[in-house]
Image (cartoon, helix red, strand yellow):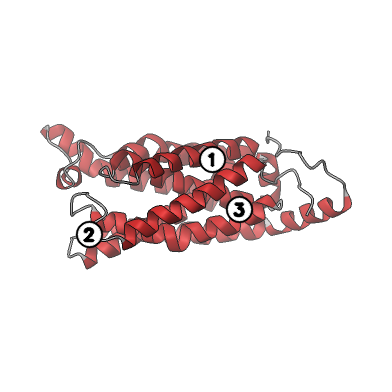
Amino acid sequence: MTPTAGSLPRPYVLASLATLVLATIATTVGLFVPGFYRDAPVLLPQVYGQDLLTLVVALPVFAVALYYAARGSLRGYVVWLGVDGYLLYTYASYAFMTAFNELYLVYTTLLWLTLAAFVGGMVGLDAAEVKRAAGRLSVRPYVVFQAALAVLVTFLWLSEVVPAIVAGTVPPSVAAADLPTSVIFSLDLGIVVPAFLLSAYWLRKRRAWGYAFTAVLLVKAATLSLAVLAMAAFQLRDGQIVPVPALAIFGFLSLSSLALLARLLRSMGSADGLRRSAADDVPVAADRRPRRGA
């Protein structure tokens, strides 16, 4: 298929292929090499759950999305970006929080590969086209979901952080893992929650970037919440206590994000059909890169 305005530039394709190879190696080693991780016992089920979800769900979806994004599919492009965001979050946490091991340089390489692809992919995403593809899709459920996600995650983490600050101690989960601080708290409260709030605000105003951010963040929310549930399953198998509110919150986020994402991607299906027709009928320069949206 002739490249269209939404196809991936070659550097991002190569970065994503390298990400697939390195992440497959990292997760396979982590899951199947006994005693590889040197983290505190309380953290090990979480790492195994993350690796399993990444290996059996995130990476296959990433590979399929990459294939279609490279062929000009808008839906493929959005899913590729969203899963890349999940992998960026995952390997940022591994690079900064996981106890040092032989794959440290793999984690740091995955960190910059996914970061470069995510930033470049967002810059190249045609936000106006995403808005057009969404058509007359009601934005209210998406605004409510993103605002609710931000509030729930904030409440969940602050329920540990605020009492520890008041008492001059360390949050229980941080103390149990024998860590100086929580990278997850920092990433969620410093990046993820503000991103969802900004996306919800822009979408409520029906700005093009609100539609674009919502589509990408829904993919990330679905994969990450499923990863948390996989971690919880490993924790329960290990005999650890998993707070019921946390299970309920992330179960709700998983189901809601998947349902909303499916609805959004269906609405974008007709846009992919039009793009394919245009690509077949109108010659497009082979080196044409994705356009930025208004």
Query: Residue at (72%, 55%) from the top-left corner?
Result: 272
Of callouts 3 and 2, the N-terminal one? 3
Residue 150 in picture, x, y percent from top left: 40, 44
Query: Residue at (82%, 41%) from the top-left corner?
Result: 285
Picture layout, residue 163 above or below residue 139:
above
User: Does 243 sit left or right of 227 as displayed?
Assistant: left
Mark 1 sits on what residue? 118
Of callouts 1 and 3, the N-terminal one? 3
Within the image, what quadrant is residue 194 found in? top left
Task: Tell me whether the residue at label 3 lies in contact with that at label 2, contact meaning CB atoms closer than 8 angstroms.
Answer: no
Q: How many marks?
A: 3
Residue 133 in picture, x, y percent from top left: 69, 50
Could you say which is closer to the camera, residue 74 or residue 152? Answer: 74
For badge 2, the amino acid type reads Val
User: Does 111 sit left or right of 17 as displayed?
Assistant: left
Query: Residue at (49%, 53%) from the top-left corner?
Result: 21
The residue mark sitting in front, 2 or 1, is 1
Q: Residue furthest front?
A: 102
Within the image, what quadrant is residue 292 found in? top right
User: Does 98 sit left or right of 254 as displayed?
Assistant: left
For badge 1, the amino acid type reads Phe
Q: Which mark is residue 66?
A: 3
Mark 2 sits on what residue? 242
